Image (cartoon, rainbow, N blue to C red):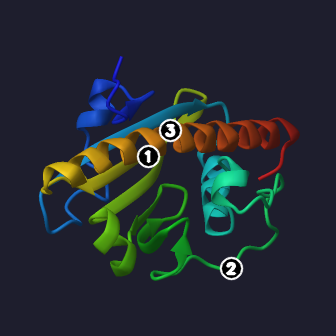
Amino acid sequence: MDFTGRVWGATTAEREAHYPCDGLLTVPHEGWTRAVDVAAPCATVFRWVRQLTIAPYSYDWIDFRGRKSPDRLTPDPAPLAVGQRFLVFDLVDFATDKHLTGVLPEAPARRYGQMAVSYVVIPHGDGCRLLVKVVSESRRPLLRRLQQRLLACGDLVMMRKQLLTLKKYAERDAGAGVG
């Protein structure tokens, strides 16, 4: 059991794997990995990951100012584009049905340190694995490192909810032939 907030649901191999966000930071960093099995096709899961460009799918009362994240896919979404916002990140790379990768913009990075994230969809059995890797600046004074630990634990709570919500919707849609 990891009590540092760095891991949830990820295997040792998944924690050690290379992700698109690895190498994006210019400072020493640490990684946080979260993962969940989803009984749905990768294309359906990725379509739900794309919804992160419009809503957080976590505890909406905290990170969406009380608005409800949509429980249905947005029809005909705009094409993904580098520079597009998703969650608190700017999209820097993507591959359809495979991953979205972003970096924290400059202003929040000054406060929280440099961060990058990859949401990755990997075929697994009859469904897929939805993995998220966050890399976060680690070279900081003691007080900032403590803040980082709290951020990792808070992020774990929010991201666990997010991944379980995306899983629920993707599995529902796969069962209904949507996506």
Residue 105 shows in this picture: no
The residue that appears at 43% across and 37% down in the rendered structure is 34
Q: Amino acid at mark 1?
A: Val
* Mark 3 secondary-structure assignment: strand
Q: Which residue is mark 3?
A: 123
Circle 2/circle 1 CB separation < 8 Å:
no
Horizontal side, residue 108 vs residue 73: left or right: left
User: Which label sits in the foreground, 3 or 2?
Assistant: 2
Q: In terms of sequence position, does the residue under pointer 2 or pointer 1 come before the other?
A: 2
Q: Give how far apart the Cα atoms at labels 2 and 1 are.
A: 23 Å
| Coordinates of residue 51 in the picture (x, y in percent) | 67, 61
Residue kind at label 2, given as amino acid type: Ala
Q: Are marks 3 and 2 in contact (CB under 8 Å)?
A: no
Foreground: disc 3 or disc 1: 1
Which image quarter is the N terminus in? top left
Mark 3 and mark 2 lie on one chain; the one further toward the N terminus is 2
Image quadrant in which you'd find residue 109: bottom left
Whole-percent x and y of residue 79?
62, 79
- Cα separation, mark 3 vs mark 1, equals 14 Å
Residue plotted at (71% across, 53% down)? 60
Q: CA distance from mark 3 to mark 2?
A: 25 Å
- Residue 140 higher or lower than 125, as above or below: below
Which residue is under mark 2? 78
Precedes in sequence: disc 3 or disc 1: 3
**Residue drawn at x 33%, y 23% as measured from the top left:** 2
- Horizontal placement of 28 versus 177: left or right? left
Quarter assignment of residue 78: bottom right
13 in relation to 31, above or below = above
| SS label for mark 1 | strand
Check disc 1 and report the residue beneath it.
132
Give the amino acid at mark 3.
Pro
